[in-house]
Amino acid sequence: ETLNTSYQLSSVPLQIFFYVTGIYYVFYFSATLAMIVYKSQVFSYPDDFLAHDLALLFLMAILEALRLYLGVHGNLTEEEAPLGLSLVITVGSVILSVYFLVWQTYVLRADVIVNSLLLVLYGLEVLLKVTAIAAFVS
Amino acid sequence: VAKLCVCDLLVAQCDVNCCCDPDCSADDFSLFTTCSVAVVTGDSRLCSQKAAIYSLDVKANPPERIFRLIDQVNPSVFCIHATNYKQALSFSSPEMPTSENFDQLLKRFGSAAFSAEPDSWNMNTDAPNPPDANETYRYEYGVPVQTVDALLRLPSPVVSSWCSDANPAGFLVNQATKCTRSVSLEKCDKIQALSMLFYINSSILAVNITVQSIVVQSPNGMRTLLNSSDVLRLPMILDELCINIVLGVSYHITYTDAGEIIEAAASFVLGAINKEALSIQQSFEISFTQVNTVPVPLSGNPGYVVGLPVRAGFLPQGYPFPGESLLAALTTNKYSQLTILQSTSNQDCLAVQGSRTPILFGYNMISGCKLRITAATKCQPLTQTLLDLLKGQSFPEYVASFGNSQAQDVLDWVPITHLHTSEQRIYNTFQSSCQIPVSLEIEVKWTKYGSLVNPQARIVNVTATITSSTLKELPSGRERIIPITSSVVFTDISSPAEPGYKAWPTINAKLPFDFFFPFV
């Protein structure tokens, strides 16, 4: 009764999406970390490259946490500023995901699969965020 | 991948059951039973890669080899889709140490452990020696010398004494072979191996084989060197003789110290056969010389090898200089060596002047002759003649201490010490006696040098002792025969080997001087 969509600007699909992305990201992070460990054992993976890739993975995790927090916060408080910031961080996450898809030291087929899925999720999220921001602004 | 073949081991020959060997023809394939290498692929962990599949179709008559190039897909989810690390999937060729990068290489690899990572983030590492960038051909010892179509071949006898043309010449392997070839007068211009063209036709990869000299051997064995050696003389039939057939070839290849062949020359001995000849003997030789050096045969590397001549030389103005080395088309033995009089069947000293034999390391020799003295022989010319006889025309002043001593290394040469002793008879001291040298004894002292496991022989001291005796005046009409001897003795003066242990570490335990402060 009180939950009338005309009064509530927060986007429910976006919220669901945040949860799904969060859960998927946990899986993505552990899978990529496990694969990097596997690659370092099976292939010749020099230390510089290994450190490089691991650092970027952890950076991506931090960015992801920040992004999700800001996104949830912005969506629930219906403010466009955190949501906009979350959008900007999403761009960074997209770039990192592309790195893991294309420019990583060893790109396995499993890497291609999880990263493409992540990119699809990001794409949909960006769309939803833009509509939410548009709804908040107007 | 289509060009890789693991079982192709023999150069320019077909390997058995090797279906990927490019040297095999279709007839060879029909004789195979199976393919020893069925699939040639790259790294199997790649997601998609090219694979060359070789198989034998035994149902066809004759059996044929089937070659297919397919794209193989790896079904695993952990296959490598792409890699941004260039050295990941192939062995990188290590840097060749040169004088410029030696220090840097030593810093990287000189410790007990080193890691394989590159120095920078640079993903596309460029190798310091781009492989095959300049297409310079570097040879290693024993590698067959390549020509434009095949390999440089030196005909040699295989199993029997008949010539086989399949013996490849190895780089830096000096060879000399003799073999028999069957000939006939009618077909002499058609047999390829008898014409000069066969031996200089194939050029050694950008270096043409030039004709250095041509010697013509007449049927009675006399050889004459031709003045112009640039005209190609092919076999032709002339008055029942076939002339200009090749009896001997001597290749001289000049190489640089980088392993490239820069010059090739061939010297020929041409002869003639008549119609009764059924076979001739051909001799072939190949020798390698480094550019800007004069080839001097080594008597050991570095220590002397027993049986090789002792090298010796002179000191013209300041440096020992091995006497002239003649690089003739037919190698002659004129390098400056220590020589000794050679005993011949004719024991008269004056008749065998000039016949000398080189002193071989480790072989004690003694030789001699008998000198006939009449009353008319004069002292002074006789002394001089005997000295020439014993010492030879050019008795060297220095002897090489190692078998490979170079002329520039002054300290590697040992001076010959000369001693004169005389058999003095007590009652002749006041007479103006004529001392004639009757014996020359050369004593070569050598030692073992180097490690205990592989000692090298090194000459330390050479002493030439001339013993003179008094020539008594002869009444006229009488003659005497005096024996003249010369000998060489090699004495081993090596000191016993000492093991090279390091000193035991001593414990240097001392209390600091103020240990008992404040009591002391």
Image (cartoon, helix red, strand yellow):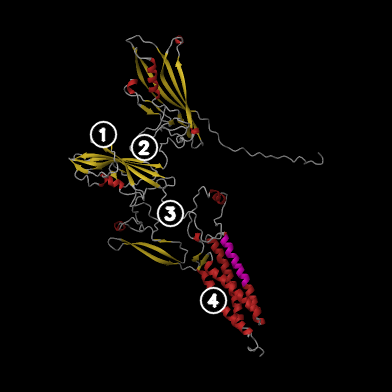
- Asked if residue A114 lies left or right of residue B173, the reply is right
Look at label 3 and name its amino acid: Asn
Whether label 2 touches label 1, CB < 8 Å? no
Q: Residues within 10 Å of mark 1 (few under 14, many from 20)?
A: few
Per the image, label 2 sits on a secondary structure element best described as loop
Q: Are marks 4 and 2 on the same chain?
A: no
Q: Tell whether position A58 is magenta.
A: yes
Tag 3 residue: B134
Residue occupying the point 58% across, 37% down? B501
Tag 4 residue: A120
Q: Earlier in the sequence, mark 2 or mark 3?
A: 3
- Mark 2 — on which chain does it sit? B
- Mark 3 — on which chain does it sit? B
Whether label 4 touches label 2, CB < 8 Å? no
Whether label 3 touches label 4, CB < 8 Å? no
Residue B443 screen position, x and y as percent: 45, 25
Q: Are marks 2 and 1 on the same chain?
A: yes
CA gap, disc 3 and disc 4: 49 Å
Per the image, label 3 sits on a secondary structure element best described as loop
Q: Residues within 10 Å of mark 4 (few under 14, many from 20)?
A: few
CA gap, disc 1 and disc 3: 49 Å
Question: Is B236 above or below relative to B88?
Answer: above
Q: Residue B222, which numbered label?
A: 1
Residue occupying the point 53% across, 69% down? A101
Q: Residue A115, which numbered label?
A: none
Per the image, label 1 sits on a secondary structure element best described as loop
